[in-house]
Amino acid sequence: MDTPCNREGRQSRHPRRLDTTRSPSLSSRPNDQLPRRGAPTGASASVEGIEVSTEHWIGGERIGSSGAFADVSPIDESTLAEVARGTAEDADRAVDAARAATETWGRTSPKQRGEVLHRIADLVQERVPELAPVETRDNGSLVRSMRNSVMPRVARNFRFFADQLTQLRESFEMDGFESRTEWDPSGVTAVITPWNAPLMLATWRVAPALAAGNSVVLKPPEWAPLTASMLADVTKDAGLPDGAFNVLQGIGEEAGAALTGHPGVDRIAFTGSIETGKLVARAAAANLTPTSLELGGKSPFVAFADADMDAVVKQAVNQFDNAGQVCLAGTRLILERSMADVFLERFLEAAAALRQGDPREETTDLGPQITREHLERVDGFVRRAKAEGATAILGGGPNEELGGLYYRPTLFTDVPAGAEVLRKEVFGPVLTLQTFEEEEEAVALGNQTEYGLAAILYTGDRDRAERVAERLVAGTVWVNCFFVRDLRAPFGGARRSGVGREGGVYSFDFYADVKNVCTAPWPQAAER
């Protein structure tokens, strides 16, 4: 994700600062009567009829900031809320609260932690009717997707890692010596997450960190920060100790940077662009802080002529999901030449039936881009692709009928080799079509990228599926399917798509301090 995968806000929209100048009447008061910077103010916003706090959640309290940033809805570009704009001082306060909680949460048993995580999952499930409309208003995703799959996945994240925690057992025996693996809490985890599925992607990291016994400071995306605030209420109601989960609102370059370079942070989990990932890694290196990076993708969608054409067409159209703002999307359609004409006819027919509009409506298939800045970035890719000689046989520009931030689903053919649109992550509803004759060429085209997050492969030949999947460079290869997520499986990117793997025991290997306890054979008298 070259820039928008600073889905945590790679490119700041430079929100306006609120006037924080103290009035003359206040400045004449004694110091102990002045409003304390960061004191709770009770600030909140009503979103779709639901009251949401716009402050930080630190140490079990709502804490304000001296400044704020505007949270703008992509649906109509209206300001939803003025949200606390965290500073380095706020980051210090959050990390200190998290560190203090390691003496409570970090000392609980796996069974106790699992019980709390299950209560969080139960409450998330109960509050889907509130969480779904707020996130839709905040980031423009389809409300039906939020309600039916995304928010239930949030609950599943907590439930899965609660159960996985109690199944962590590993021991070895050699010459009578027993080695036993233990996963100890590592301390404070900073989680910085993107805007395209903010709560689901946040809890994918928050849940295993909490399960491992760590305390967490979450820096949500400034382009969609509200459901993270709602999650804080959930954790409180579920009985999570104060300070074990904290929400630091703010801008990536400010609050996010303060966290990634903080010496009190023991783990960093980041999702964003390659360039921002480098900055995170550089900041983390100063303190030797272990870091997990998910840095986006430019995934190939490879289909052979022996594949199920109905499935190929349906899944290819599905790559427009979330208005193309999905890092895993197979945006590079790579088809065997003999199937291309039939595929195109059917694809264009299916794409024409997509309904673009207000994501709060049940019949909508495509919503808006996240911000005006991001829409212009997507349009820049499209205009440059046309200038390089590519042909837009579908879409090719903003949806002028709807206006606002709606961009028409776009498909390019005749794309010159090496064109920017083939190499860079657009992070919008823009696909390209290439064809091949031989299997070797399909693999070469699939791997012709600096990314390696995922790949999609459709074929009716099992042997070919195994051969091609083995050769595609990707953290995940989906064969005759897409977006199937067994949370036990490793997830992460190859090449420049990231560093590390998470999921199942892989998550605990990152968030925990993994320890080997090696015990000599006990004398018979000492045996239990």
Image (cartoon, helix red, strand yellow):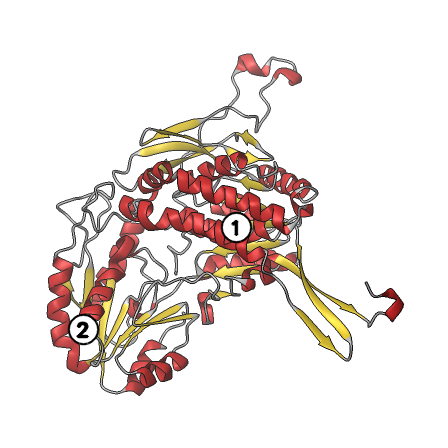
x, y percent for residue 197: 38, 50
Which circle marks residue 309 in the picture?
2
Nearer-the-camera pick, 340 or 108: 108
Mark 2: which secondary structure? helix
x, y percent for residue 65: 52, 31
Mark 1: which secondary structure? helix
Mark 1–mark 2 distance (CA, rounded to whole Å)? 39 Å
Q: Is residue 406 visible?
A: yes
Q: Amino acid at mark 1?
A: Ala
Residue at the image position 52 percent from the left and 29 percent from the top: 64
In the image: residue 408, left or right of residue 73: left
Figure check: 39 above or below 492? above
For label 1, count other residues whose C-alpha is less than 10 Å away and answer few (under 14), some (14-19) or many (20+).
Answer: many
Residue 137, quarter of the rendered image: top left
Residue at the image position 56 percent from the left and 63 percent from the top: 505
Which circle marks residue 443 in the picture?
none
**CB-based contact (under 8 Å), mark 1 and mark 2:** no
In the image: residue 6, left or right of residue 34: left
Nearer-the-camera pick, 289 or 102: 102
| Residue corresponding to mark 1 | 207
Residue 80, quarter of the rendered image: top left
